[in-house]
Amino acid sequence: MNAIILSAILGVILMFSGIFVTSKTAIRNIATAGMALLLLVNIAEQGGFHLFNVNTHNMLVFSKFGLLFNSIAFSATLLFFLVSAKDITNVGINAAEYFALIFFISCGIAIVSSFNSLLLLFLGIEIISIPLYILTGSDKRNLKSNEASLKYFLMGSFSTGIMLLGIALVYGAKASFSMEQMHSSINAGRNAWFYAGLLLVLISMLFKVSAAPFHFWTPDVYDGAPTVFTSFMATIVKAGVFIALVRLFDMSFVGSGYDWQLIIAIVTAATLFIGNITAIFQQSVKRMLAYSSIAQAGFMLFGVFSQNDFSREGIILYTLGYSLATIGIFAVLIKMKDYTFEGFNGLARTEPVLAATTTIFLLSLAGIPLTIGFFAKYFMLASAVKSGSHLWLVIFAILCAAISVYYYFRVIQSMYFKTGLAETEPVTPVFRWLLAGMAAAVIILGIFPNLVLQYLYF
Amino acid sequence: MPINLYIFVALALFCIGVIGVLTRRNAIIIFMCIELMLNAVNLLLVAFSKMHLAEMGSAAPALANNGTDAQLFVFFIMVVAAAEVTVGLAIIVMMYRNTHSVDVNFLNRLKN
């Protein structure tokens, strides 16, 4: 509860600071301090300290898993602010509003990580989506940004309509929006409505996480949006929707006696295949990262697929590892003048720190041992093996991970083994230190993943 | 009036909305079709709410307020739809200022 209320208040504060504060540096500092405060308050709630006592009538349930996820999402956002706050204020003139929208999205993430009623699921997803439409189009004079925003908006609200029809059908079958009623035997004669409704909700959620048959908007939107916001969308927001999907599955499909694992297995395989194969043919690193985010979503779908302790640990690690690495790569990408692979040629000579940290982040995304990405992938695959069905999926995922090495290493190859003069914007020493710190975190957590996972249990 | 008719009308409206989104090329008409989908869901929720009230109100008086949460949901959908209209029309206007067109066929520059 702390995080939901405080993030909304902080969003409003930042909107007002857009009127009263003229200095962009001051706005950046307010936003970063606000996000740090949000993180602290959420950690306090993990320890049992509640700032607000609101009776939610069991519409929100705050579990250890959800709170830990919030902490990880907020610390990733804090890192994102530290690394790229200057680029956020450079997108347009409304610097404070961008931060305000990001705080509102954080509020949505805190809601979907704790919903216990389909009403709150719907509200949380919409609170995440609507600010994102604005952030995508925030570069108002840029035609690509406009297009991306219109496309995202039309498709996003279309999928919202589908989700609402699903929720309405589930309500028709079960006479309640509460997740606890999903298994009640009430109105067993209307199970067809129930399954149809759940499938529609599932389709719209898969759309939001850009899983395979519904991924077509992703590359265009990620490519067209201002690069800072692509970084935010592809990491924290995507993980937030994944948590909603995991919780939804945990409480509705599991135990319903319905072969949902087959559906998820097919979706996962298609997502992995399309994401990895298409990423190979990209010329622009930004677009390659968009396809790679589809492929990574395929791995995160394992958390939905297996639904056991391993997959819960896996999804926490995956969120952390994927967010750290992708935020880092995007932070470097924003500084590049040329977004194509050729633009990275010879970066190791002009900016050795940037090249070295980017290499570590890419290794983590590819899942090489000693990085957190390895353990994240390991936990995901182990959970699927443990759940015991559809083992072909695990083998297929490993093959796809091997394919992904090709396009990640292409960037490393152009940075270290090709001659050229990679042009970057001037970078400050603080930025280099922050990147180095993130790379160190990727490696340390890759050796001791329990540093994070222990919080799941006490 | 039997409840089935309401459900059929709501589903028909929803399908008209879906077909409109898939076939029309004008951004504003697509947007209207999306609103039609949301309002079809509103109708469906209200119909279900009355249905549950009629079924359960007599059987279990303790559950007599069972139908009302769907009617509350309808208000939430209306609020969210209003928020979407604000953002969506702003995006369409921004698009129009730059291209002087609201045709979604223009949206193909990102493809290459």
Image: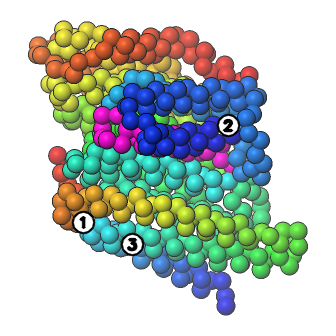
Q: Relative to A421, does residue A241 appear above or below in the rendering? A: below
Residue ID at (51%, 53%)? A126
Q: CA distance from mark 2 to mark 3?
A: 38 Å
Q: CA distance from mark 3 to mark 1?
A: 13 Å
Q: Relative to A175, does residue A295 appear above or below in the rendering? A: above
Q: For this view, does A42 lie left or right of residue B56?
A: left
Q: For this view, does A394 lie left or right of residue A182?
A: left
**Marks 1 and 2 belong to one chain:** no
**Is residue B2 visible to us here?**
yes
- Determine whether the residue tagged by mark 1 lies in a helix, strand or loop: loop
* In contact (CB < 8 Å): disc 1 and disc 2: no
Residue ID at (63%, 53%)? A120
Q: Relative to A4, does residue A48 appear above or below in the rendering? A: above
Residue B32, which numbered label?
Answer: 3
Point out residue A458 in the picture as x, y percentages from the top left corner: 74, 22
Task: Please name the predominant secondary structure of the magenta segment in the image.
Answer: helix
Q: Residue furthest bottom?
A: B1
In magenta segment, residue A106: yes
Task: Identify the chain of the residue marked 2, using the numbered disc in the image.
Answer: A
Residue type for callout 3:
Met
Question: Which residues, given as a range, are shown in magenta?
Answer: A89-116
Residue B102, which numbered label?
Answer: 1
Point out residue A362 in the picture as x, y percentages from the top left corner: 34, 21
Task: Identify the chain of the residue marked 3, using the numbered disc in the image.
Answer: B
**Is residue A183 visible to us here?**
no
Give the residue at mark 2: A2
Residue ID at (75%, 34%)? A50
